[in-house]
Amino acid sequence: MNPIAVLITIAAYFTILFIVSYVAGRKADNAGFFTGNRKSSWYVVAFAMIGSSISGVTYVSVPGMVASSSFGYLQMVLGFVVGQLVIAFVLTPLFYRMNLVSIYEYLEERFGMCSYRTGAWFFFVSKMLGASVRLYLVCLTLQLLVFEPFGLPFLLNVAVTVLLVWLYTFRGGVKSLIWTDSLKTFCLVVSVALCIYYIASHLGLSFGGMVGAIADSGMSRIFFFDDVNSKQYFFKQFFAGAFTMIAMTGLDQDMMQRNLSCRNSKDAQKNMITSAISQFFIILLFLMLGVLLYLFADRQGIQVGRSDELFPLVATSRFFPAVVGILFIIGLISSAYSAAGSAMTALTTSFTVDILGTKGRTEAEVVKMRKRVHVGMATLMGITIFIFHLLNSTSVIDAVYILASYTYGPILGMFAFGIFMKQPVRDRYIPLVTLLSPVLCFVLQKNSEAWFNGYQFSYELLILNALFTFIGLCLLIGRMENGKGRMENRIIKM
């Protein structure tokens, strides 16, 4: 694809993005940045949340996974729906009752300062690494399509990319993100739907013919009940999906900032139920697109190396009009930059509120501190991306994703204990428990096939991680420390 066309497409998208961000974020104060002043309409947040759950990596990877796992990913997505219901009816009312800015403030109220800081730091490490890796992979695509043809260095690529993310989030925070995520959702849905249309038309398939071709392809199997040792086994995927959604959405400051921007918990619940159902059908579209891409590549004799290369390889090929490549670029850019923007906003919020602290500070002092933190988050993200580039190893990327998934287990375990158990615990020992739980999970994962007759752990490792943390907290039950961790029964009881 012509680099000029890619550049014009990106420039046009960001022009619209900045306009939306400016209009939505003007006159935003700290409350607007952190919680959107809790005035967001639930249906707007629901539409925005569809796109916010899809990153640039998902946009590229999900279509390619049908060759190895068919439609098995939908087993996990069904778990996502159940997880959203738990978030909507268990966590959301609790967070609204406590009027939280950062959801990790709950840990301070329930256990004490050590738990509070532990949860915030686990989130910080996970989100910074995860967001940086996702943006790094997009920078690689931009380097190939735009910067390299013009002879521009990767460092400039990273600087421009992070600067753009910082610019459209520094003013309005969550207040802006709700509307920029809505733009992202629109771009994602339109780009995927039109790509499906163009590819199906090129294959000479009507709608009915397309559905039949997908069903007959051998890549449309959804449910896997035959091998309990397989990572595709239904109950592994389903329960892992439910707990992953609870941990990585309900206990993630990035995702919950949007949900907590609704007027009240009832509106937030409407938003989450609507977005969960919608997400199922959006993922289904991605999987359908994947089958069509493989059918097209097979017919044209296109050699596909890694599965992640399938969508960009076909979309930017000479077989389609330029509009297909443009749609791919718009979908990729909108998903990647929006995810990075929301992560930067959440990191700024969590670091400002949870780690530095805003209690006892004036509005002006918090504004000044928040802006400095925002610059710091952008700088650190840029440095992390460039380090990934210097290491230039996909094994490092895989390790980062594994580490990111491990960090949510202790958070899930702490929240589960806090909500369902009433006893106080020895707060100062909680950091030790949360460090030992991932270590135990790592040992199990490395030895599971030898110890358990070929059993392979998949995403259910998150559940074990949380369980180990929960058991560890049970062992720490004791007298309250300095009055910390005392909560009224109305908060503990759901």
Image: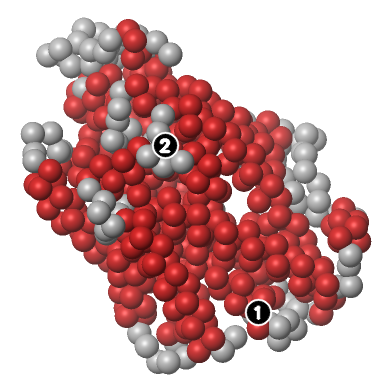
| Residue with the mark numbered 1 | 323
Q: Residue at x 47, y 62 (%)?
A: 336
**Colour option used:** secondary structure
Q: Residue at x 89, y 67 (%)?
A: 205
Amino acid at circle 2: Cys
State the SS at label 2: loop
Instruction: Give x and y (percent) for residue 114.
Output: 20, 28
Nearer-the-camera pick, 236 or 348 = 348
Q: Is residue 150 left or right of residue 61?
A: left
- The earlier-in-sequence mark between 2 and 1 is 2
Q: Please, is residue 403 above or below residue 204 in the view?
A: above
Q: Please, is residue 302 above or below residue 306 in the view?
A: below
The span from disc 2 to disc 1 (Cα, nearest Å) is 37 Å
Q: In which quadrant will I find the N terminus?
A: bottom right
Q: Quadrant of residue 344?
A: bottom left
Q: Residue at x 18, y 16 (%)?
A: 484
| Residue with the mark numbered 2 | 262
Q: Is residue 324 left or right of residue 187?
A: right
Amino acid at circle 1: Val
Using the image, tell me which numbered label, if any, was put on residue 259.
Answer: none
Instruction: Give x and y (percent) for residue 338.
Output: 44, 59
Q: Quadrant of residue 387?
A: bottom left
State the SS at label 1: helix
Toward the bottom, the furthest residue is 150
How would you rate the neighbour count of disc 1 (Cα within 10 Å): few for under 14, some for 14-19, many for 20 or more? some
Q: Residue at x 78, y 71 (%)?
A: 199
Q: Please, is residue 418 above or below residue 14 in the view?
A: above
Visible residue check, residue 246: yes
